[in-house]
Amino acid sequence: MKYADLHVHTCYSDSTFSPEEVVEYAGKEGLAAIAICDHDSTDGIEPSMKAGAALGIEVIPSIELTVERPDTEVHILGYFIDWKKEWFQDKLKEIRNFRIDRMNKMIGKLKAMDIEVDADEVFKLAAGGSVGRPHLARVMVNAGKVKTLKEAFNKYIGYSKPCYVSRIKLSPQDVIGMVLEADGVPVLAHSKLMGKDEYIPKLIDYGLKGIEVYHTEHNASAVKRYEKLANDYNLLITGGSDCHGMNKGKALIGTVKVPYELVDKLREESLKIRHDRQKFFIPPR
Ligand code: AMP
Ligand code: FE
Ligand code: FE
Ligand code: ZN
């Protein structure tokens, strides 16, 4: 039986693993395929594909985009995206540039609380990819400002904590539309963490095609609930570990996986999305 872990990050967003390390771990876990789903960046895709080709591991080009709302966060995964489109890269660049401004603002807020953080260290960890709070938290730990990543979030940079700054404002329509226009299959990530099941029908109206039913943070009852929801709405069921390297304490890759046939279903759906767009004469950007 072949398996795939459909939710993996690299150091081009907030994982501690390089693409090569991700692929090496995937190989040790015996995975046939992995989806590289960095936040707001596709830079980890090609190096992962290159490393994957050497080990016979398929890399599914993917993305994770975030909608920030006052009551929750909606994370949308996009599978089999045509990531090389220029407009798509321009949009990601805009989102990442906003992250850079935001990071400088958060560092400013920390400074106002007499917590000095070296911005260069933070950006160095981000390796030119998407800079995020996990990078900031790691620098805070390394500099002895807090003992653990958790403490950094709980005291300073968690949502609604004093040094938190919002990300770029995007709507669910924006991010689902962005994935669809790049021929990607939009899937709701870790639905339980969103915690707003009542939003799901609206997301489907906007073009959502699947739900991440299996996830590290989903217990048996969550799996059951989202499996039923997916079946009721005729959505694809996906699953992945959401591996962030060692940021979550251990390498989770392969601890959540789905049968490989799901990969073929996602590929078919992506082809259908492209075909439908051409059929309805929606011009590619
Ligand atoms: P950012 O995109 O910069 O807002 O960072 C979001 C990332 O921070 C998430 O993907 C998680 O990996 C991590 N994160 C968010 N909240 C917490 C928390 N309370 N404790 C630890 N990590 C967190
Ligand atoms: Fe993350
Ligand atoms: Fe997420
Ligand atoms: Zn993720």
Image (tube, rainbow, N blue to C red):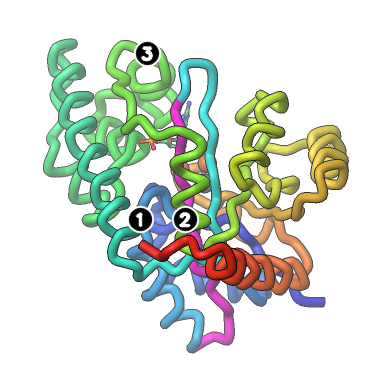
Q: Nearer the viewer, residue 213 or 81?
A: 81
Task: Please give the residue where the numbered disc 2 appears in the rendered image.
Answer: 63
Label ID, residue 71: none
Q: Is residue 261 left or right of residue 195?
A: right
Q: Nearer the viewer, residue 78 or 183?
A: 183
User: Label 3's element?
Assistant: loop
Q: Nearer the viewer, residue 14 or 270?
A: 270
Task: Please give the residue where the numbered disc 3 appears in the rendered image.
Answer: 161
- Contact check, label 3 and label 1, Cβ < 8 Å: no
Q: Is residue 78 left or right of residue 68?
A: right
Amino acid type for the residue under numbered disc 1: Ser
Question: Which of the 4 image quarters holds residue 198?
Answer: top right
Does the numbered disc 1 mark a residue whose Cβ is under 8 Å from ligand 1?
Answer: no
The range drawn in magenta is 54-68
Residue 240 visible = yes
Give the overall secondary structure of the magenta segment. Answer: strand
User: Label 2's element?
Assistant: strand
Task: Please give the residue where the numbered disc 1 appears in the rendered image.
Answer: 41
As for residue 184 lying within the magenta part, the answer is: no
What crowding class fits label 3: few (fewer than 14 Cα within 10 Å), some (14-19), or many (20 or more)? Answer: few
Q: Residue at x 49, y 88 (%)?
A: 54
User: Label 1's element?
Assistant: loop
Give the Cα separation between the discs numbered 2 and 1: 7 Å
Residue 25 visible = no
Give the Cα separation between the discs numbered 3 and 1: 26 Å
Quarter of the N terminus within the rendering: bottom right
As for residue 64 lying within the magenta part, the answer is: yes
* Residue 67 in the image, given as x and y percentages of width and height: 46, 33
